[in-house]
Each structure stands twice: as structure tokens, then as C-alpha cells.
Image (cartoon, rainbow, N blue to C red):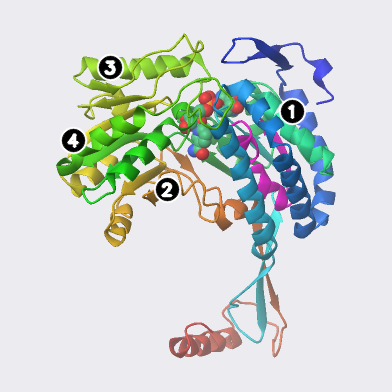
Amino acid sequence: MAVFEQVTERIAVTDPVTGETIGDFPVMLPDEVCAAVDRARAAQPAWEARGTSERAALLAAWNNALWDDQANAIQIIRRETGKNRGSAYVEIALIDSTVQYYASHAPRLLRPQSRRPAFPIRQRARVYYKPHGVAGFITPWNYPLLNALFDAIPALIAGNAVIIKPSEATPFTAKYAIDLMHRVGIPRDVVQMVTGDGRTGEALVDSVDYISLTGSTATGRKVAVRAAQRLIPYSLELGGKDPLIVLKDADLDLAASGALTAAMENAGQTCVSIERVYVEAPIYDAFLDRVQHYAAQIKLGAESDFDTHMGSLTHARELERTEDHVRDAVEKGARVLVGGRHRPDLGPLFYEPTVLVDVDHSMKVMQEETFGPLMPIMRVADADEAVRLANDSSYGLSACIYTRDLKRGEQLATRIEAGDVALNRPQMTFGTISVPMGGVKTSGVGRRNGPEGLLRFVKPQSIVVDNALLAKPALTQADSMTRMGVNFMRRLRRLFPFV
Ligand code: NAD
């Protein structure tokens, strides 16, 4: 950040609720980004040398400081996004779970692993896990704390230096969190922030050793092409159109309230937002009744208490897209069951929690990511039709099924084309840090969370040691000694496959 004075172009950040300018920040272009990467590269070896446990302890100290300062953190997040307190709290709670999970599991997961050698006794095979070096993170605005740091946590614990490019809409939350990291002792050059727009993101892809993007599918395609040109590894956490299926044996109160919660969380601006609901015909009317009952209780507003369920949208474009999807659906025969109105009386970007019925797959609301507080519900004949329609999407991020038959529900879940599926509690896979999370189809490449989310930040290096017992000089890999060994091992492994 010391290079700010070299740049002239600046971007203003506004409070979506009041429209006031919070501040501005510079657009950092390739020279500044490269300078940051150079500093990170110079600092990384000493960070790696500290060892996994020491790095994990520093992240744990940061997490504790963040937890203790959560009232302040929530205020900073809310000011940039306009979200309700509960959605800001979720960011801090998930950071806490992430740090706790990796701080306790990473030392074991990153330890060198013994593997089966080709010729036991004579050989030993081990895999070492080495950090990539400098990992870059291009992140969105919807959860400006969580998404800026979520993936950087395992990258840091794995021994990488990291550079975070937060969204141009919400840089101050990331700055706050990174300053706090420096205050607990994580070296300044090991975790840095570069600010700017897509140009800054491009410069980051062009200079780091690993790139992680959380953002839209359109940006994901661009980042993948750019990373491919350099042949650097990457992961992409992209958009979704998550389906929720309600089977006829479901607890309808839980299903209706759960669906609404997951559709309206963060005003629908959540990657794993429920954006389509399929309900079996016999319970369709009863389900709609329960949805109306719970939707009437959702409190929309700018208040800072936990009882306000939904806040403002963050950008005008989310408001415009939500209105467009409602308009398109209604023109094609859909009916607004709940909400459906812009609420400028509360603030420029407030929109009511909205439920649509009589929808079908010809409508934008069933095909395109809305990223707004909109829940379309469709009647289906049976579970097979629900699964077919759930899979009729270019996206495949996350999904949910409500049923009391847990065994059948789990079997059905395996038929859904999504990176993860939750039963009876939508978005819970996202909150279960031990399991991998990420998309199939156009929802992404790679996985965050779980061992998979850590191991993407290391390069496995295999080392095979041959003690040369009884070895003789040879000028071919197929010398008589080796052929004898191959035959012997072949017979042995028929009897003892795991030798
Ligand atoms: P976006 O793609 O517009 O921007 C994301 C980031 O990419 C920003 O920091 C932006 O400056 C940067 N960027 C833009 N163009 C770039 C380019 N050409 N090269 C490099 N970087 C570039 O997305 P957004 O509007 O900030 O976020 C909303 C999207 O993110 C939604 O589609 C949502 O579903 C998705 N999202 C996905 C997840 C997930 O885990 N799968 C989580 C949160 C959000």
C-alpha cells in the first residue's frame, strides 16, 4: 500500500443505504501489483520456514482478535454493503470455523506422507507438500470479509504469501481485516492488499503463482483463460442457481421457513442462495400457505439488530436484475405471491422479499442467477421430475432437499448435479468447513474447505529413495534384476494387494 502516491485514478465507495461516500481508493495497475508480488515473494521463504503450527497459531490469534472486535467489524461490513446484522455476523462465524478447522487439521494434512514404493524394503516413497509461493485472491463484494479471507486462510497456513484484491465496491472491510492480521504479527509483506477493478485483477493473474477467484461466471472464464496462458494453477468459485426440492413427506414448516431463510439471506446476494424451489404436487398448496405465513414475518429494514432479517441490496444492478426477473416472469404468466415491490421509502436499494408462483423454465428467474431476494416456486409431479428440473441448469453450485426419509433423500442427493447437497437445512454444507465446497458445470473449478481446500495451495513433491540394496550397474530400466523384482511383486500383490 506504500505505492499509493504513484497512481492517480481513484474509485469511490458508497454506503448503499444512505448513498453517502465512505471514501475512495486507488486503482493499482501492473507496476504496483508487480511490486507487491515482488515484496511477497521475498517475504515468503521466511514465512514458510516458520512451520505450519506457528503459522496456524498466528491465524488463530488474528481470529480471536476479530471475534473480540466483532461489533466494529460488523459495522464496517454493513456500511459498505447495506446488509443486515445477521448476514454480517455469519461472515465472522464462518471465518472462526475456518480458522479453527485448519489450525487443528493443517499440521497433520501438510506433514510429509509415506506412500507405497514400487519395491518395498529397497525403496521408500514420500510426498512433501510445498507452498506455491505467492497466491492471489480476487474477491467479490457480497461477503466482503468472508470472501476476501476465506480462501486466504488455508493458503497462509500452507506457507504461501498472499495478495488480496477485494471488490472495488467493498475494499474497506478487507483493509480492516488485513490491518488486524498485521497487528497480531503476520508480516506485512506476507499478507497484502491491492486495490482496483478488473485491470488490477488481471495484473494479479499475470504475476502470482496461484490465483483464486470468487466472482461471477463471466469473470471466471476470463481469469481461467489468463491463468492458462501462464499455466498457473487456479480455482474459481462462481455463480449459482441453487435448487431446493420439497418432497411430500417433508416437515412443511421447516421447509418453508428454511427455503425463505436461504433465499433471502443477505437479500439473496449469496452464491449459495436458494433461487429455485420444486414442490411435490400433493403438498404444493399447503407449502405455499406456510411460505406466506413465514414470509409475512420477515422484517426488512436498515436497523442494526439481529431481528431485522433483510437489509438493502448493495448495488443498483442487483435491484435492476431482480425487477427484470420479476417483470419477465409475470409477463410469461407467473404470479407474485409475496412482495414484489421496490421500497425506496427504506433506502434507495431496498426490495421486498419476493415469492413467485406459476413459474416455468422459459423464464429468466428459473435460468439466470438473480442475486436478489427472489424465490420462485414450481409444482412438480414427483421426485424424478424435481431432480430433472433441478439439473436443468447451466449452474451446479449447491442444492437442498427437504424430506423425513433421510436414506431416500441422501440417495436422491447423489443424482443432483451440484458440488454439494444439504438435507433439511439449506446452505449447511457451506457452513461445514470439513467438507469440500465448490461448483460443477459453470459454477466453478476446484474446491474450497476440507482437506481439498488446503491441498490446492500446495505443490505435492514426490521423493523416492532407493537404498540400492543388491543393486548392480545397468544400462536399461528393464535389466534382469528389475524384471525379477517386477515378477516377484506381481505375485506378492495378488496375495497381499496392499503391500
Ligand atoms: P465479479 O465477477 O463482477 O467481480 C469479482 C471480482 O473480480 C472483483 O474483485 C472484480 O474487480 C474482479 N474482476 C472483474 N473483472 C476481472 C477480470 N477481467 N480479471 C480479473 N479480475 C476481474 O463478481 P461480483 O459482482 O463481485 O460478485 C458476485 C458474483 O460472485 C455472483 O455471481 C456470485 O454468485 C459469485 N460468488 C460466488 C461465490 C462462490 O463461493 N461460488 C461466493 C460469492 C460470490
**Which circle's residue, 3 or 2, is located before the other in the chain?**
3
Select label 4 or label 3 by which is in front.
4
Q: CA distance from mark 3 to mark 2?
A: 29 Å
Q: Amino acid at mark 3?
A: Asp
Within 10 angstroms of label 1, few (less than 14), some, or many (20 or more) residues?
many
Q: Are marks 3 and 2 in contact (CB under 8 Å)?
A: no
Q: Are marks 4 and 3 in contact (CB under 8 Å)?
A: no
Q: What is the x, y in percent for residue 18?
A: 59, 11
The image shows residue 266, relative to residue 14, as above or below, that is below
Residue at x 24%, y 48% (from the top left corner): 247
Q: Position of residue 8 (x, y in %)?
A: 76, 11
> Which three-letter amino acid code belongs to the residue tagged 1?
Val
Residue 168 visible? The answer is no
Nearer the N terminus, badge 1 or badge 4? 1
| Residue 437 in sight here | yes
Where, quadrant-wise, is the C terminus in this rendering?
bottom right
Q: Against 210, is 342 above or below?
A: above
Q: What is the quadrant of residue 121 in the picture?
A: bottom right
Q: In the rendered image, which residue does mark 1 sit on? A: 33
- Pointer 2: what residue? 419
Residue 42 in the image: state x and y as whole percent. Answer: 84, 42
Residue identified by numbered label 3 = 328
Mark 4 vs mark 2: which is more N-terminal? 4
The tag earlier along the polypeptide, 4 or 3, is 4
Cα separation between marks 4 and 2: 30 Å
